[in-house]
Amino acid sequence: QKEVEQNSGPLSVPEGAIASLNCTYSDRGSQSFFWYRQYSGKSPELIMSIYSNGDKEDGRFTAQLNKASQYVSLLIRDSQPSDSATYLCAVLNTGGFKTIFGAGTRLFVKA
Amino acid sequence: EPEVTQTPSHQVTQMGQEVILRCVPISNHLYFYWYRQILGQKVEFLVSFYNNEISEKSEIFDDQFSVERPDGSNFTLKIRSTKLEDSAMYFCASSERSGTEIKREKLFFGSGTQLSVL
């Protein structure tokens, strides 16, 4: 079983729409969850972190966490062409020294 | 804004040679990491380093690899006897996490070193 799973996409949404990205993880002891954005040829950049069940909002981004279902999601409201990138779900393992990344979901926002 | 600096940005080497990739983490960060990303694949954990010792390493991080913090600012990854399959983008990252704030692990990545083994 893969440690962090994401749909590879691509996910294509029109400008102004809501993009919904999903992720599942296998380590039940994990307590810290992250979304990184990676533009082509660039390094990952942290956009959201979430540690408790429920929703966490930051501007146009909302992260959702359900530990019972081992599920993390990211909603991007009012999507812009500049949001076109690969979104990486990342989970800190139980030991606390290893952040594991999913393969990423490619998002295309069409103008 | 503080950033993680990696040098060189590109490194070309012959198979069997040794390479050293260099990183300067953000100055007040205490935890350091190396990740790699083979073209078109996911970001893979290699090793984490804290208090001058390895905290955790992956199966990839075998005897071919070593890390060192030779002084107060640099953090290096040495790859001995490089193989074709070592060709990848290597990212250094650091985090500020202090004390028991394990939950607050947020990684700041450098821009990477593209390693090409010929």
Image (cartoon, helix red, strand yellow):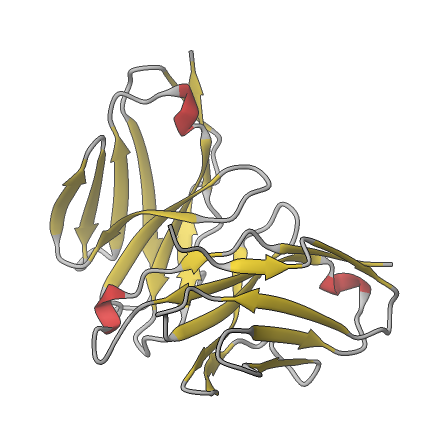
Percent of width and height locating residue B61: 60, 77
Whether residue A3 is visible here, answered yes or no, is: no
Percent of width and height locating residue B101: 21, 73
Residue B12 lies left or right of residue B98; in this view the side is right
Q: Nearer the viewer, residue B39 or B114?
A: B114
The residue positioned 36% from the left and 70% from the top of the image is B29
Q: Quadrant of residue A69?
A: bottom left
Q: Quadrant of residue B113?
A: bottom right
Q: Residue furthest top?
A: A111
Whether residue B74 is visible here, answered yes or no, is: yes
The residue positioned 46% from the left and 49% from the top of the image is A44
Q: Nearer the viewer, residue B93 or A78?
A: B93
Q: Quadrant of residue B7?
A: bottom right
Number of numbered tags placed on the structure image? 0
Q: Nearer the viewer, residue B6 or B65?
A: B6
The residue positioned 54% from the left and 81% from the top of the image is B69
* A6 lies above or below B6: above
Percent of width and height locating residue B70: 58, 83
Percent of width and height locating residue A23: 34, 48
* A18 lies above or below A70: above
Residue B71 lies left or right of residue A99; in this view the side is right
Residue B63 lies left or right of residue B49; in this view the side is right
Query: What is the quadrant of the C terminus of chain B in the image?
Result: bottom right
